[in-house]
Image (cartoon, rainbow, N blue to C red):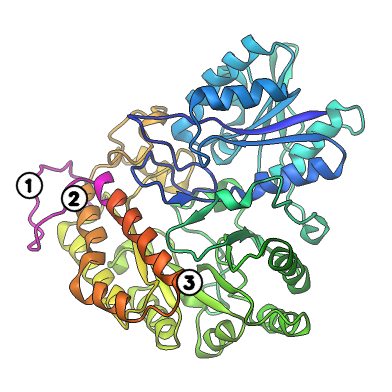
Amino acid sequence: MKTAILYPPFRKDGELPLLTQNRHLKFSKTLEVRIFPLVPGHLATNLKHLGHEVLWLDGINRRMSDDEFDKHLTDFAPEIVFLETKAPVVKRHWKYIEELKTRFPKMVTVLMGDHVSYFPEESVVESKVDYVITGGDYDIVGRNIVQHLAGKEPLGPGVWFRKDGVPATTGPHKLTDALDSLPFIDRVLTRFQDYGEAYLLRPTAYILTGRGCGASEDSPGKVGLCTFCIWQHALWGKTARLRSPGNVAEEMQECIEKHGVWEFFDDNESGPIYNIEWLKEFHKELVKRKLLGRFQFSSNCRADTLSVEVVDLLVKCGWRLLKIGLESGSDYSIKHLAKCETVDLISRGVKMAKDRGLVVLLTTMMGYPWETEEDVKKTYEVTKELLLYKVRTGDCMQASVVIAYPGSPLWREATNKDWLLIGKTDYEKYDMSHPILKSQYNASEWCAKTWNLMKHPKFVFRQLVTVRSLREVDLLWRGLKSLLGHVQDYGDPLPENGKIHATPQTAGR
């Protein structure tokens, strides 16, 4: 069957959405964020391996015009189209599906992603979509839908559809443990060269060492419970599944030898870093395949998973960068978010990584309803301290306004405590253009002030004097362009004294 995986280039005020593989969607001025959508990539590859004709059409990251996108779609004339969606664009996708049905009456449409995993029936009722996939393994469920429509398989669990005009379902989704059985992503079919972020060296390939979020053995026995994390609660069911080290190393070897990939980014929630036995076996696989020194590796990471032994092992395996969530400089906030960490523990992990030569991308958020201005000042100061600690080329940070996506535990708390500044189903307003939660300070201004830490003279100087390659020169140039775009997203920064000029909406602890 002729199948297409589509990302229509919707725009808002001329800006494209950061939709693909993004936990938080926003329409941004930066053009340096092009994250590869990994699960849809596996879906495209799965379908091709089964003999179906596949069109990979990412109008967002290819920066297509509407006319250019529509021409590709019309020329291919798919029988089935898949659309990954999130709350801020789900209503646009409903309207787009209606337009597709008008142009291609026999076309079958499928929605997938975190929002429809929480609210699948809503899309069946509110739109003309034919199927809605629930759960994070929508590559496997999507493959099943195509095989079902081709008359080769019964429809499996995790699907919503319409039966006799009313919503129906095949039951709850089931996550697979057989991740090694999936084919490696076809990098040519999915145009891997179109993707990359400012903090990654080129050529870049995104991979998944597993699916879900793992915590260290020292944590209170809980895995991935952060209340703001839409993926862990909507897609992965608070689980952590890993591929085998050999399977991951084999995929990397293919990318290096066939496509000249230099850096891999593992977009698994916290990667396999919490599993030291996995890392030891992974190192053995890299040695056996003679891959060490032929690539660099970066990944998400929880700070509480880091020890001297783990960090040294990461360095031996070729790690360059760790993306670590601080989220707040307040222990109260971190506990409230159920991160199972502390500011001291996160600081210890970041400094330990930097002490051993790794670079760190630190992420944080502003605008929690229970925080005071003193709390956000702490976040700013902790971020500043960690960013300026032993700076080397590649260190960076991200700051964003906290968004409580519909269905997440934080969203449920916000609705119960009257923290929302918008209607619960005003989905288009969850796009990070403005805070959606009541706050005791101006979160957007604090985000801009925090982004501007990367203009600090010490930070700039150390970035420049530690450059060691032409790839790193390119990294700095792309990073500068990305920074300027992100600062524009949040407006002018606060003055150094942090004085707030706007009158924020308040919400107490």
Q: Relative to the observer, which residue lies in front, 438 or 245? A: 245
In the image, residue 396 lies at what x, y percent?
Answer: 35, 67
Nearest to N terminus: mark 2 or mark 3: 3
Nearest to N terminus: mark 2 or mark 1: 2
User: Residue flagged by tag 2: what amino acid is it?
Assistant: Glu
In the image, residue 80 lies at what x, y percent?
Answer: 73, 26
Distance Cα–Cα, label 3 vs label 1: 35 Å
Q: Which residue is mark 1?
A: 501
Farthest front residue in view: 470
Q: Say what secondary structure mark 2 lies in.
A: helix
User: Is residue 364 at least partly visible in the picture?
Assistant: no
Distance Cα–Cα, label 2 vs label 1: 9 Å
Q: Relative to the observer, which residue lies in front, 438 or 498? A: 498
Q: Which residue is mark 2?
A: 445
Distance Cα–Cα, label 2 vs label 3: 27 Å
Residues in magenta?
A: 487-508
| Residue ID at (27%, 77%) | 388
Q: Which mark is residue 380?
A: none
